[in-house]
Amino acid sequence: MARCAAHSIHLPDAFTLGVILSILLGLFVPCRGVVAVGFDWLTNAAIVLLFFLYGVKLSRRSVVEGILHWRLQTLVLLSTFVLFPVVVWLGRGVLESLVGTALFSGMLYVACLPSTVQSSIAFTSIAGGNVPAAVCSASISSLFGVVLTPLLVGVLFSMDHVQGARVGLEAVLTISYQILLPFALGQWVQRLLKPWADRHRLLIATNDRFTIWLVVYSSFSSATVQGYWAQLSWVQLTGLVVASLILLSAVQLIIWCVCHLLHFCHADSVTSLFCGSKKSLAVGAPMMLAIFGKLDNNLLLPLMIFHQVQLMVCSNLAGRWHRTAQIRGQRE
């Protein structure tokens, strides 16, 4: 059964297939006019619901327990919000030559985002990592990201002279009512709704996926109507894949070396690598609307490409460590 689970992760899952379908619909059946306005309202409502349910799901006890493992949590947070921006900024010459100036702003945006939650925990579990610590790390990263991501975007985009980032009072208010307020309300009513949320995990997971599919469709639909794709070449798309591989490999190598220097056990090293080297599409797309006031395809496309690359690379690593653990267990 475990071996089947390790191999099945390489197959396209429902989320990935949904993203692909959303892209195809946005390319060939774009929405226009009043329908597009309706989709914008629906997208905003879905985002509010998404962060409200995050507030309901995130256990305050797990956050407190996770903070106690301070070395691992500190490494994950520093990797997510410091190492990523530093690597992108220092590697600008290489990355920008691969993707171009406009899409490089998307790489900067990727560097500012928090870690994923579900996939980080899943990969950690398969690879034999510290699952409780992974739950805490991913959750804390998402929580910190609500505050740190807009600040990082403001700093990096100002340094890079990128237009469009609204990290002033308007952005703070938008983030407050669209992200912070729903999350806080979710935490407030957690005692009442947590049992319901635990019983309907599949429904909540479906809502997470639906929100991303909706955001992807809206973005690609808008890009199709505006003629964005005619300006994008296959060379740039290939460059995005290569740039994502370079960025992910550099960050993972540094994290693994730091874990070795800190004498982390294998389980904690696995957790640090998976939680510290991944970026959240589920949080990144909604935050883009809050910070920039629109879905910018120069930012969203690098995020989607990096998301798929990190899934494939981490899937391979998790499967390899899982098989290694099985072989070691058979020998013992």
Image: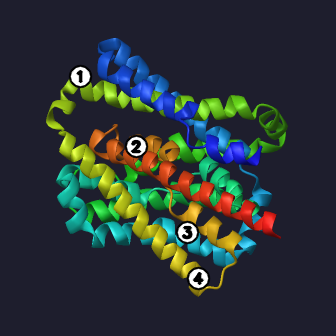
Q: Badge 2, how many Cα within 10 Å: few under 14, some, many 20+?
A: many
Q: Nearer the viewer, mark 4 or mark 1?
A: 4
Q: Amino acid at mark 4?
A: His
How far across and down, in percent of the image, does residue 291 sit? 38, 47
Q: Which residue is mark 4?
A: 260
Q: Amino acid at mark 2?
A: Met
The earlier-in-sequence mark between 3 and 4 is 3
The earlier-in-sequence mark between 2 and 3 is 3
How far across and down, in percent of the image, does residue 299 sit? 32, 46
Residue 329 lies, with reference to residue 7, above or below; the image says below
Q: Nearer the viewer, mark 2 or mark 1?
A: 2
Q: Secondary structure at mark 4?
A: helix
Q: Is residue 168 left or right of residue 207?
A: left
The earlier-in-sequence mark between 4 and 2 is 4
* Contact? badges 2 and 1 (CB < 8 Å): no
Q: Which residue is mark 2?
A: 304
Residue 44 visible? no
Q: Which residue is mark 1?
A: 225
Q: Nearer the viewer, mark 3 or mark 4?
A: 4
Q: Which residue is mark 3?
A: 77
The earlier-in-sequence mark between 2 and 1 is 1
Q: Amino acid at mark 3?
A: Leu
The earlier-in-sequence mark between 4 and 1 is 1
Q: CA distance from mark 4 to mark 2?
A: 31 Å
